[in-house]
Amino acid sequence: MTQALRTRPARVLASGEKVQLTDPKGRMHTLVLTPGETFHTHKGLISHDDIIGRTEGIIVSNTGGVDFQVFRPRYEDFVLSMPRGAAVVYPKDSGLIVTLGDIHPGATVVEAGVGSGALSMALLRAVGPTGSVHSFEIREEFATIATGNIADFFDGEPENWSVTVGDLTEALPQTFAPGSVDRVVLDMLTPWNTLDAVSRALRPGGIVIAYVATVPQLSRFVEALRASQNFAEPESMEAMIRGWHVDGLAVRPDHRMIAHTGFLIMARRMAEGVAPLEKKKRPQAANAAPEDVAAWTQTEVTEEAIGTRTAHGKKLRRVMREAGKRLRTGDDDTGTSETGAGDRPPGTQRDVADTDSPRTHSNGPKEDR
């Protein structure tokens, strides 16, 4: 018996939706569709009414004869163009966190350091409506920005997401019973300070994942995991993506790439009272000098010390106003929320330099377009 093919009608682009226009040079522009409004470029105009009610994947021309492809923004497009006050976890890293961290539908996930909400979005999509994500953020203004961005991304604040403004070390034991959390994701300066609370909250077999920027942070967290005797041998890695230029016989690696953005460390929770197997090591020729160990482990880790860049003052207040503005007002005040080649949210520590902005180049890997 032949089974009938299932069809799903294409969802048309509606008023209030975000769309991404791409010109022949690969330049991207993001706007909010509003009836009667016009998108302006230096080479002509496009009426929003020419897009509303049609499917994505179309081509529209402006009054100057320039064609634009129209699509809904992907997760990557949204994250790299949304208002940001703090560092974001790059899509290449959030993908590894979700897959190698085995974050699955129905999981209970705790996140510390919500930042601008980029990783929270990936976690929420992974756990699905049957799971939950609870975020802890020590700075109220970052929690406000993340709440707006997440609501904008999901067209409303997800019911299975909550955020607590406070220190994870103090708030986690008051929020979750021991052994009730499946995964803990730490995007913070000193994740090793949270291990007592994290160990109590995680169920046996649960996974803790840390995302840190520098080698000293990587080393200190791994050694703290080992010293706790609560986790199996941790895994440490980083991801680097290099795009390729493909044009006929001209096939070569791109000149630009996103290399180091952060380190990922993952470890699994042992059963209560069970010590992990010790990793066999070759004997070292000499031990490190005490003064070297002290310099490595006792130096204070601060945002300034590791080069973190976050928005402050007027810029931070502007980002707070922009995050979630589309949903708060129903329609954007001007009818557009345009992100052109030179418009990008405030720079962050894990972002590439302005000359390598993901929105300033039409050539190169995806993160460089």
Image (cartoon, helix red, strand yellow):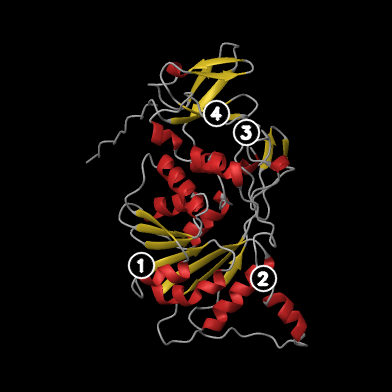
Q: CA distance from mark 3 to mark 1?
A: 40 Å
- For image coordinates 56% across by 86% down, the residue present is 278
Q: Which residue is mark 4?
A: 338
Please rate how many residues cluster around mark 3, counting C-alpha atoms within 10 Å: few if below 14, some from 14 to 19, many from 20: few
Query: In which quadrant is the C terminus drawn?
Result: top right
**Does any portion of residue 164 appear in the rendered image?**
yes
* Number of the label disc, if any, that sits on residue 175: 1
Going by the image, does 17 lie left or right of 227?
A: left
| Foreground tag (2 vs 3) | 2
Q: Which residue is mark 3?
A: 343
- Mark 2 vs 1, N-terminal side: 1
Q: CA distance from mark 3 to mark 4?
A: 8 Å
Q: Amino acid at mark 1?
A: Thr
Q: Amino acid at mark 2?
A: Glu
* Number of the label disc, if any, that sits on residue 300: 2
| Foreground tag (4 vs 1) | 1
Q: How many marks?
A: 4
- Mark 3 vs 4, N-terminal side: 4
| SS class, disc 1 | helix
Q: CA distance from mark 4 to mark 1?
A: 40 Å
Where does the image place residue 166, in percent across and percent down from the top left? Answer: 45, 62
- Mark 4 vs 1, N-terminal side: 1
Please rate how many residues cluster around mark 4, counting C-alpha atoms within 10 Å: few if below 14, some from 14 to 19, many from 20: some
Asked whether the beta carbons under mark 3 and mark 4 sit within 8 Å of each other, the answer is yes
Where does the image place residue 171, in percent across and percent down from the top left? Answer: 41, 68
- For image coordinates 47% across by 77% down, the residue present is 196
Q: CA distance from mark 2 to mark 1?
A: 29 Å
Please rate how many residues cluster around mark 1, counting C-alpha atoms within 10 Å: few if below 14, some from 14 to 19, many from 20: few
- Residue 173 vertical position relative to residue 71 in the rendered view, above or below: below
| SS class, disc 2 | loop
Asked whether the beta carbons under mark 2 and mark 3 sit within 8 Å of each other, the answer is no
Q: Amino acid at mark 4?
A: Glu
